[in-house]
Amino acid sequence: MSIASIVVVFVLSWWFCFFLALPFGVSRTENPQSGHDGGAPLRPRIGRKAMYATFGGAVMTLGICYVVMADLISFHTG
């Protein structure tokens, strides 16, 4: 795999993990004030979720790179 394809795989897996982590640990406001969204989380903890996504994306990228480089799944035609 080239460096560019590894970066693309990492970015895609990072976003996958980030969207997967978003709903975890969400607590909503019991009585929202007027004009506030009732579904908005009290503490979104985006930084923590980004760190989890970075770790998960790195693990997924390593796994995908291993599968491709070991020719467990071949993408070559001919």
Image (tube, helix red, strand yellow):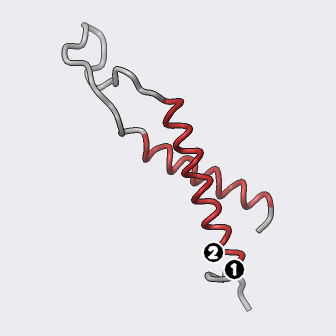
* Residue 26 in picture, x, y percent from top left: 33, 31
Q: Is residue 7 left or right of residue 53?
A: right
> Looking at the rendered structure, which numbered label has been put on residue 24?
none
- Residue ID at (50%, 33%): 48
- Residue 43 in the image: x percent, y percent? 39, 22
Q: Quadrant of the C terminus?
A: bottom right
* Image vertical order of residue 34 relative to residue 24, above or below: above
Q: Residue at x 65, y 58 (%)?
A: 9
Query: x%, y% of residue 69?
Result: 72, 75
Classify mark 1: helix, strand or loop: loop
Kind of residue at disc 2: Val
Taking depth in this image into account, of 12 and 35 the one nearest to the observer is 12
Determine whether, in the image, residue 59 is placed left or right of residue 22.
right
Disc 2 marks which residue?
A: 67
Q: Is residue 35 above or below residue 19?
A: above
Instruction: Label 2: state its secondary structure.
Output: helix
Q: On screen, 9 above or below 48?
A: below
Hey, which quadrant is residue 68 in on the image? bottom right
x%, y% of residue 52? 52, 42
Q: What residue type is disc 1 on? A: Ala
Residue drawn 80% across the image and 64% down it: 2
The residue identified by callout 1 is: 70
